[in-house]
Amino acid sequence: MLNSFISSLVIAGIFGAVRGSFSSPGWKKGISLGFCLALFSAVTLLNWSGVMDLPNNICLWWAIEGFIIFLIAGAAMGWATGKWAPAD
């Protein structure tokens, strides 16, 4: 639980630092960052294929799950920061 909380703060901090680089509505900024994080996560998970005697399909499904979660969470985070903490 603590690890998830710290990870959320780190991702929110990264978004706060780079959100001015995107010129679009808040939710679209969040999806852009979510896509970048999903690519990073997918590459990491696909590198684990064959490690720890896991089947290759499980790493692929974890990568797909990461894309879904990061895109939805990125859109929600972008919308919330656009509403309550505008970049001006």
Image (cartoon, grey):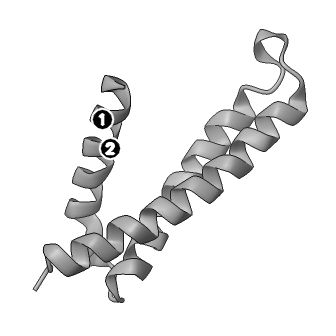
Q: Is residue 85 visible?
A: yes
Quadrant assignment, res 68? bottom right
Above or below, 9 relative to 86? above
Under mark 2, the amino acid is Ser
Quadrant assignment, res 16? bottom left
Whole-percent x, y for residue 52 in the image: 77, 10
Label ID, residue 20:
none
Q: Is residue 20 visible?
A: no
Whole-percent x, y for residue 74 in the image: 44, 64
Do labels 2 and 1 touch, CB within 8 Å? yes
Residue 70 horizontal side relative to residue 77, left or right: right
Quadrant location of the C terminus in the rendered image: bottom left
Label ID, residue 5:
1
Whole-percent x, y for residue 50 in the image: 84, 20
* Residue drawn 39% across the image and 79% down it: 27
Whole-percent x, y for residue 76 in the image: 40, 68
Quadrant assignment, res 6? top left
* Residue drawn 24% across the image and 79% down it: 82
Looking at the image, the residue that sits furthest to the front is: 1
Under mark 1, the amino acid is Phe
